[in-house]
Image: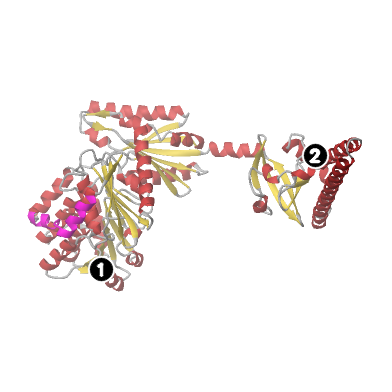
Amino acid sequence: MKRKHWTLTPWFLIFAMAMLMMTMATYSYNKILCYIELGITVGAFTIVIVLSIRFQNYIKGIVKSTAEKIKGFNPEHLEKYKYPVAVSGKDGDILWCNARFRKVMCGGKSPEGESINAYLSGFDISKVCDSEGVDIACDGKEFTAFCVSAGDGIVCHFFENTYYKNIVREYHSTMPCVALISFDNAEDFFNDSDEAYSEIVASVETSLQKWAAEYNALYKRVGTNRYMIIFKDSDIDKMTAAKFPILKTIRSINANHLTATISVGLSRGEKLIKDSEMNARKALEMALGRGGDQVAILSNNSYEFFGGKAAATEKVSKVRMRVIANALSRAVCDADKVFIMGHRFSDLDCVGAAIGLQCIMEKSFKRYSKVVINRETSMAKQLIDYASERLEEEIFITPQEAERGVTPRTLLIVVDTHIEHSLESPQLYEKCRRVIVIDHHRKAVNYINNALVFCHEPSASSASEMCSEIISCLDDSPLGYVQADALLSGIMLDTKNFVLKTGVRTFEAAAYLRKKGANTLTVKEMFSGSIETYREKVDIVCSSQVYRGCAISFSKHSSADVRLAAAQAADEMLTLKGISASFVIFNDNDKINISARSYGRVNVQIIMEKLGGGGHQTMAATQLEKNAKDTVYHLLVSAIDSVLDDADNS
């Protein structure tokens, strides 16, 4: 409650005296009017006196209560303090302050009756009372205010520390931030003439040197196509505000239809350059794992990403896959059982990769091996039935059966995902001490970080392609036509029949599987759906609406095949003229799901990441808590606007 009006008591007394003089003047004209005015004057005067007495008693009570709580409290003593002090009531009205408070905080004016909150930078005194202090600013100066309750009052002490806070800000702004830069696709330009390659590398290095010189930063080449720049922390704020234009500058360097890209790992908040360099390596690894052409900033164990518009560059060399195959074989030889598991709501790529590996684990390495899967929720039921009918032994088991069979030497191979909460059975993962990950999705922040072997290739078309290459480096004689069909179905699913993310290695893997007996007609049959699923897909496509070149639709059904229908509808909407990306929103398992697709012009992975999901540049998804459809639609539109606006500005 504000009591500012009580400070107007002297003015009320002056008005009362003026009314009394006017009343006396009225006496000679009209006695009755004079008596009426006299009564009003006496009443007003009485009210002013009563309010004044009450206010004085209020102040005395607060001050007395405060004095009892604070030993040695004396206004004359506090008046001598060299820092501002004020006493307020429980309602926050200022009752008393020393001269220093008037001079520093009020510009020489008397603040009695005003709210103390006005001098606490908007903080409510009832919430900051008896706290560790709050930082405030007043008239260009900075203070730390300590508000201490004392009886019915609150004593506020204001300590000026502008100088020290400026020093702290300067310290943090000049902290070293290490940036490690990798020239992503230098090998692609190396296939050209030596002169052309040298020109491209020189152009990239010149651009990086200009970038460092712009901020007076230290530039150093630390290896082949690897660079290090040490910035000040305050420079990073400027870069993030500008969305790191260095990415666009590097993309402007091109030759023979190839565009140069870089990945940047940047660390913030570390006091030592050694720690900053270590975190910069982690950030660079994350940027490369997400496909490159982006900046990953690691600060306080959390990541922030910028860029990521270019498609991941295909690695032509298979040396890494041979190394992975050797590491995998050593891990399998040390195991007594091998379980192969993918993600929830498994698809053809997930199941196909698992079937291919299971055959090699069991027949080449002579290890007990099973594919862990939930048949009821799988989207690859036709492939599961196909394999079950044609293989001599049942290779599929439920997550519960696998959990009961875990031993200390059990090896778990995770395919087509690298995120724990996306696994078919997170409980099985927690029980297995030995884990191998094989995945092609762009790297997420919460990835599985305790794997013996982490085979991650974002440039690969599918997990089935990666597993085909690994199998070709092992003893692949047991691989039959059933496993080849399964692997080829996974490749065809994720490439949309060799249209998206298809590189040289993709066709080499398909040719390898064809030699192993894969039949394209048989694989094609695995993509056939029921008439009900087709009707649902058509209904979703027909009810779609277009927003900024993106087709958005809601599924009105909640059938068992709603996921399959939504995915197929998203693919179908991409064939419509003027559509760069498609999004289908549907309900399943008490969750709101969004399936997203594109041909690469719009990065749907970034859009889904803003909603808590992830995936690929051309194929992504997310899952949200159940909300009204209008709410989910507005969240999606907001994410689309954010990504498209950034793309327009870059």
**Comparing labels 1 and 2, the label whose residue is closer to the camera:** 2
Residue 157 higher or lower than 188, as above or below: below
How many marks the image carries: the answer is 2
Label at residue 99: 2
Q: Verify CB contact (< 8 Å) between mark 1 and mark 2.
A: no
Q: Amino acid at mark 1?
A: Lys
Upstream in the sequence, badge 1 or badge 2?
2
Q: Which residue is mark 1?
A: 337
Q: Amino acid at mark 2?
A: Ala
Task: Bin the neighbour count of mark 1 within 10 Å (Cα to Cα): few under 14, some 14-19, many 20 and up.
Answer: many
Of the pair 486 and 505, the residue shown nearer to us: 486
Segment colored magenta? 521-541
The x and y percentages for residue 240 are: 44, 37
Of the pair 433 and 356, the residue shown nearer to us: 356
Secondary structure of residue under mark 2: helix
Decide if residue 117 is on the left or right side of residue 486.
Answer: right
Residue 203 higher or lower than 647, as above or below: above
Q: Mark 1 to mark 2: distance in Å?
A: 81 Å
**Is residue 289 in view?**
no
Instruction: Identify the residue shown where x is 11% and y is 57%.
Output: 525
Decide if residue 280 is on the left or right side of residue 117.
Answer: left
Instruction: Identify the residue shown where x is 45% and y is 27%.
Output: 214
Of the pair 578 and 23, the residue shown nearer to us: 23
The x and y percentages for residue 324 are: 25, 53
Decide if residue 139 is on the left or right side of residue 484.
Answer: right
Label at residue 300: none
Of the pair 440 and 36, the residue shown nearer to us: 36
Secondary structure of residue under mark 1: strand
The x and y percentages for residue 336 are: 26, 69
